[in-house]
Image (cartoon, rainbow, N blue to C red):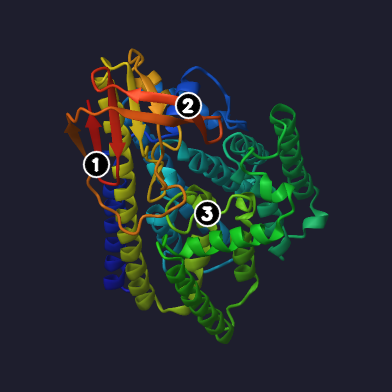
């Protein structure tokens, strides 16, 4: 790499980091639906929430409350800090992995891997949604465990630290279940290391698998399930078609943004398949389809296993936290492949093009979460201002904004936490269809309108939360009284308040 290329290289990296920090900044982000359930429970030291065992993330929320109280920006700053540290670790792990397999990194490949992971836009739910941090915390301790795994031959204390961080990762997020399989694959493909004759390696790997089994058993004992109630259906029914489709959705959403039109998404999938086929052909011609390439490919593909029952939304951002760990290995894979196809000069050009695309999609995703936060913030504020009303009727309560959770649940909990003196009875008349019907276009603004229309309105059914979703409940007829009650009507751009 000559002097000019080196300067361009470091300018590219520096600009990418600064622009990424600007797009991730906590300003204008707020609490979202499920945050209002998990943060108050964490404040009160409830460590097993929603039938899951993730005490590490819950403790982080407890610590954030101690530092920031109800200032949402503080919680989002923690999310950004976690992601920034993870990006550094991704760069370090890629360097260790390349070094272990004697892969030349004269192009500073590990720096590009770290930057690409930092600005990667399709796992941003983990950064922009406060409780999405479970994925980044699981990755944090997973990566720390891998870091000491690569150093464990030097000192026994490094092996102990690797196991310690792995155990913490198991108490953070289910993506950490990949660790035993990850090190097993690394051992298998490391032909310079005779695994079977090294008892320390055998003991270490066996201990990692044992810890995984023990943690799964503990989970079953305390929750009754291996996964959460919403995770198990596809596995329990042996719905292999659904599992396969979920795998493909996860795989191609790693490459692609959400699409409103499924036909366009399928067209984009064909483009990705064609590009990958061309890439594989070029690598074959260059004789670069080596053992290390196979290892990276397997590490990337198996990283989807913990999420097969869940899948991901192809229309919006919901579920992008499931791509956080897979994106680690995807970034390893992609940058390694590109560095083997292009010369240093063209590698920089291609990296620049990809980074610009990533930043564009990241900016777009941020707008979804900013608006979602604006809706939740203004809604709870307005309801608090209506404390003099006996009942507050809510029509078309928003569930999502392009996949960003709004009030899928948590409205009552938000008021109990932020405005405990608000005593008006909330009556949910209807919810919007954003959970099943994607929005074609995204409008950034959201405003409050007031109306003094004086009309009686009869409500013959309401929605009641049953712990999993809303159920319709018929009534004998509730009459809206504008003198005593308030009526809130939502659409995509406004909240209209009749008072």
Instruction: Report the residue marked by disc 1.
Output: 494
Can the viewer see residue 153 in this picture? no
User: According to the image, label 2 marks what residue?
Assistant: 475
Q: Where residue 7 sits: x, y (%)?
A: 27, 66
Element on which disc 1 rests: strand
**Number of residues whose C-alpha sits closer than 10 Å to that of mark 2, classed few (under 14), some (14–19) or many (20 or more):** few
Q: Residue at x 32, y 38 (%)?
A: 373
- Residue 463 pos. (x, y %): 47, 32
Which corner quadrant holds the N terminus?
Answer: bottom left
Instruction: For mark 2, give the secondary structure.
Output: strand
Marks 2 and 3 in Cβ contact (< 8 Å): no
Disc number lying in front (1 or 3): 1
Q: Secondary structure at mark 3?
A: loop
Q: How many marks?
A: 3
The foreground one among 84 and 156 is 84
In-front residue for pair 32/435: 435
Residues under numbered marks 1 and 2 in contact, where contact means CB atoms less than 8 Å apart: no
* Residue 312, numbered label: 3
- Residue sitting at x 76%, y 39%: 213
CA gap between label 1 and label 3 equals 28 Å
């Amino acid at each position: 790499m000559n002097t000019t290329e080196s300067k361009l290289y470091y300018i590219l990296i520096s600009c990418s980091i600064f622009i990424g920090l600007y797009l991730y900044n906590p300003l204008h982000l707020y609490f979202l639906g499920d945050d209002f359930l998990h943060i108050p429970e964490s404040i009160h030291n409830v460590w097993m929430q929603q039938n899951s065992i993730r005490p590490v993330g819950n403790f982080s929320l407890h610590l954030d409350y101690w530092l920031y109280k109800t200032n949402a920006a503080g919680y989002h700053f923690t999310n950004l800090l976690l992601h920034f540290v993870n990006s550094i670790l991704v760069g370090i792990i890629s360097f260790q992995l390349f070094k272990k397999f004697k892969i030349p990194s004269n192009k500073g490949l590990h720096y590009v891997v770290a930057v690409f992971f930092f600005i990667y836009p399709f796992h941003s739910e983990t950064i922009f949604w406060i409780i999405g941090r479970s994925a980044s915390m699981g990755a944090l301790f997973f990566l720390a465990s891998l870091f000491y795994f690569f150093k464990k031959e030097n000192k026994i204390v490094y092996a102990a630290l690797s196991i310690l961080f792995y155990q913490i990762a198991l108490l953070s997020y289910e993506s950490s279940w990949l660790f035993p399989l990850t090190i097993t694959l690394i051992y298998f493909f490391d032909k310079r290391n005779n695994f079977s004759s090294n008892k320390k390696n055998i003991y270490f790997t066996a201990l990692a698998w044992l810890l995984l089994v023990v943690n799964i058993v503990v989970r079953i004992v305390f929750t009754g399930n291996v996964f959460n109630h919403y995770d198990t259906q596809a596995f329990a029914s042996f719905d292999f078609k659904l599992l396969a489709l979920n795998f493909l959705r996860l795989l191609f959403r790693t490459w692609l943004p959400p699409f409103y039109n499924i036909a366009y998404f399928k067209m984009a999938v064909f483009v990705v398949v064609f590009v990958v086929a061309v890439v594989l052909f070029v690598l074959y011609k260059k004789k670069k389809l080596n053992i290390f390439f196979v290892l990276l490919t397997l590490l990337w593909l198996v990283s989807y296993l913990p999420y097969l029952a869940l899948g991901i939304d192809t229309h919006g951002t919901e579920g992008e936290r499931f791509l956080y760990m897979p994106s680690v290995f995807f970034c390893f894979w992609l940058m390694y492949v590109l560095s083997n196809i292009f010369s240093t000069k063209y590698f920089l050009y291609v990296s620049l093009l990809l980074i610009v695309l990533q930043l564009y999609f990241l900016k777009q995703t941020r707008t979804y979460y900013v608006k979602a936060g604006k809706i939740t913030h203004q809604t709870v504020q307005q309801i608090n201002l209506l404390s003099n009303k006996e009942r507050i009727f809510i029509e078309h309560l928003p569930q999502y904004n392009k996949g960003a959770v709004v009030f899928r649940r948590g409205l009552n909990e938000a008021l109990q936490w932020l405005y405990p003196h608000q005593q008006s009875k909330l009556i949910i008349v209807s919810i919007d269809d954003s959970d099943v019907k994607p929005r074609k276009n995204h409008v950034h603004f959201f405003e409050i309108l007031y109306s003094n229309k004086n009309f009686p309105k009869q409500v013959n059914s309401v929605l009641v939360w049953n712990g999993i979703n809303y159920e319709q409940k018929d009534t004998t007829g509730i009459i809206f009284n504008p003198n005593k009650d308030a009526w809130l009507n939502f659409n995509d751009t406004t909240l209209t308040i009749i008072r």
